[in-house]
Image (cartoon, helix red, strand yellow):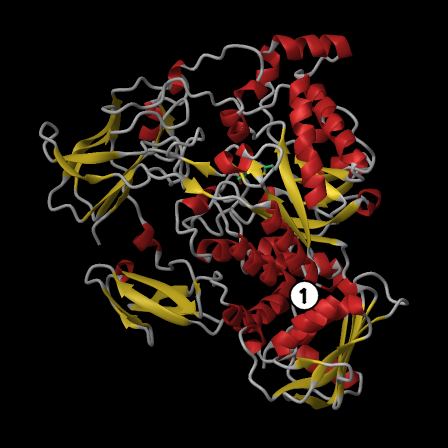
Amino acid sequence: MKLRNILFALVATMSTCVVVANPAIIPTPKSYVAHEGEFRLTSSHSVTVSSSTLAPLANYLAQHLNVEVSTKGDIVLRIDATLKSEEYRLSVTTNRVEILGGDYGGVFNGVATLMQLLPADVYDGLTLPATIACCKVEDAPCYAYRGFMLDVCRTWITKEAIMEYIDLLAYHKLNKLRLHLTDDEAWRLEIKSHPELAKVGGFRGGDSPIWPRYGKWTEKWGGYYTQADMREIIEYAKVRNIEVIPEIDLPGHSLAMASMHPEILCNYTPNLESSFGYDTRSAFCVAKESNYALLHDIIREVCQVFDTKYIHIGGDEVETSQWKRCPDCQALMTKLGYTDPKQLQAYFMRRISDMLAEYGKKPAVWNEAIDGGKLPANTLVFGWMGVKECKLSAAKGYKTIVMPGQYFYFDMKQSKREPGHDWAAIFDWSKTYGVTLTSLGFTAEEQKNVAGFEASFFSEAYASRTPERADYLHYQTFPRMLSLSEISWVSSDSRNEKLFYEKMTEHYARLDAMGVAYRLMPPKVTFENGMLSAKCDDGSTIYVQNVVTNVGEVYTKPIATTKPERYVFVSRRGNATSPEAAVDGYFRTLKPQFTITSSMPEHATMTFVKAQGYGRLARTARTCDAGDWVQFTFAQAVDCRRMQIATGNFQLPRFIFEQGYAEISYDGTTFVRVGELQNGMYIIDNSPRPIKAVRLVCTSRGNGAKYVSIQPPTILPRL
Ligand code: TNX
């Protein structure tokens, strides 16, 4: 018996109730008490609601339960004004199911719990009859803001895909979805008074003024939400107790806007030589009154479409160097007596906040926005950079959402060799689960200003995969989302990671039914006395592959071998998969001495030597043109099973040769063309002869940046 069930049995016995299988509800309810008997759900049952406000919820539940809505059902949903907002009571007896909630959200939360008391197929077509063990649940969330942010700019995510994702959030009682609707790479919301913003700015590449990026090079690519689409999303979310909060990222991250409207930029002539004329400036000029007129049109429409109290207006990573060079911004600083361009940012944010106030809305901003001066007291601050910034915001008296990258950025890698970013940290579900305000050092006063938690998914690395399928989004966000759900619902003193993991693995059956392509923990691989074995504890199947013979099969028993490094394991269940697991030898790389030469001059500080030391990137001093090349020459010809040579940032096709090909030389003088670059990269598998040099040749002009990044090669030895 699992530890969790033993504890559960004990508690249940002490409270003189019967012991039933623990339902593994995520997030964990405050109190769940099992009673004798079960409610047998058949198609003759129906859902009844006490008021018309709950009608959409009745339909939602009835659909999941595969029953009808009626006026005299025995599955009853009711608002009980004595309960708090989002609080609920759920009671299941042998002949009746009743959910009382403090408000719509409370009843919804009860409904979400009820679904987790049913067999997992409630999420993909419930088979009737089905049974629900009798019980009483009393429950309420710890935090009012339990959010998730989705970057729909770097990767275009369709309306339908957003709705599917909303379902996943709702099943886990998350109640805010923040849509990052504008950025350097796209403008995704229709603005009727400026239709070009979405019609042109929703696409990049091709004839769009917005440069292609992150893997979509050859064709024009993207999309946008009409206001009608957005209203549909908002309604869909509302039924599921989710508030949709838009983000218009200002005054930085506005390159898409600037590509369509260069007149928003500062009043100076930039030096565009190194980017072949492409203007990469991304910040609105603060001193131009015409910018405020344009923004007022936008803000008015955004406020009309979204019924949320908060509109997020950005404020992150503004390149204030642009304002330093702008005579108009400088004159404004003098006029206002400012000494620091950050004060200009606060000035800008206050002006946009005033516009929001005209429409009865409150501002939400990223943490840097409060650095340069006071914002309205009702501003909601999103602390992303670190714990320090969150504490500072709370200490200044702003309501604060805690989301530091190292715990909450689900675009980060989950372990070293997996996909994703790594600038904030490399972490899996356990690190997010471990977050408590006290352990992060928040004082009692600061804690009072924490409105809740949010996780985010920035989507740079998604576009270059297969965004037509949700797999990468799912893999990065589940099961980390389960941790987010738990910590924003349950108080920190009732947490236990080991028990939570057991519960999570039981919950996997539900994720399978929901169709989530989540990440499993890697199988545990050991090699002892000539025997190689792998284990997992989550009900998944382990597969093993011999990378020399290329034979793959289901792993059933330990393998006798003298070459354990030849075997790699993954586990799978439903749509889920684990990262690769193997003995260290499998992951070993070679680091032979080499030099980089190029037709392009090297960057002043990120010189070619940086990459020659392995581990770091080098850069060129300008962007690339057709005919430009980068060559890697090895001191000794290298015999290997794989060699990967790449332009661009680690994990992220940006600052690359967008089009090009690779040439190999076995003697250092004669080169043969071997194939096209994929995302600025070429991989040579099982070269018949040792490789003396590789040259990447560019066939396209420019890359939307001022330079090309060059990675050290990744070389895998023969096994
Ligand atoms: C930082 S989060 C950013 C985003 C990137 C993200 C990638 C924030 C306010 N700015 O522009 O997409 O890192 O993790």
Q: Nearer the viewer, residue 302 or 332?
A: 302
Q: Which residue is mark 1?
A: 27
Q: Confirm if mark 1 falls within 8 A of ligand 1.
A: no
Q: Is residue 98 visible?
A: yes
Q: The C terminus is located in which quarter? A: bottom left
Q: Nearer the viewer, residue 702 or 388?
A: 702
Quarter location, residue 165:
bottom right
Q: Report whether 130 appears left or right of 719.
A: right
* Residue 95 against residue 273 in the figure, above or below: below
Quarter location, residue 248:
top right
* Residue 504 against residue 220 in the figure, above or below: below
* Residue 344 against residue 545 in the figure, above or below: above
Residue lying at 48% horizontally and 23% vertically, measured from the top left:
280
Mark 1 surroundings within 10 Å by alpha-carbon count, few (fewer than 14), some (14 through 19), many (20 or more): many
Residue lying at 48% horizontally and 46% vertically, measured from the top left:
156
Q: Is residue 441 visible?
A: no
Q: Amino acid at mark 1?
A: Pro
Q: The N terminus is located in which quarter? A: bottom right
Residue lying at 25% horizontally and 36% vertically, measured from the top left:
592
Q: Report whether 543 appears left or right of 74.
A: left
Residue lying at 72% horizontally and 20% vertically, measured from the top left:
343
Q: Position of residue 636 (x, y in %)?
A: 16, 33
Q: Secondary structure at mark 1?
A: loop
Q: Position of residue 74 (x, y in %)?
A: 75, 85
Q: Position of residue 10 (x, y in %)?
A: 72, 82
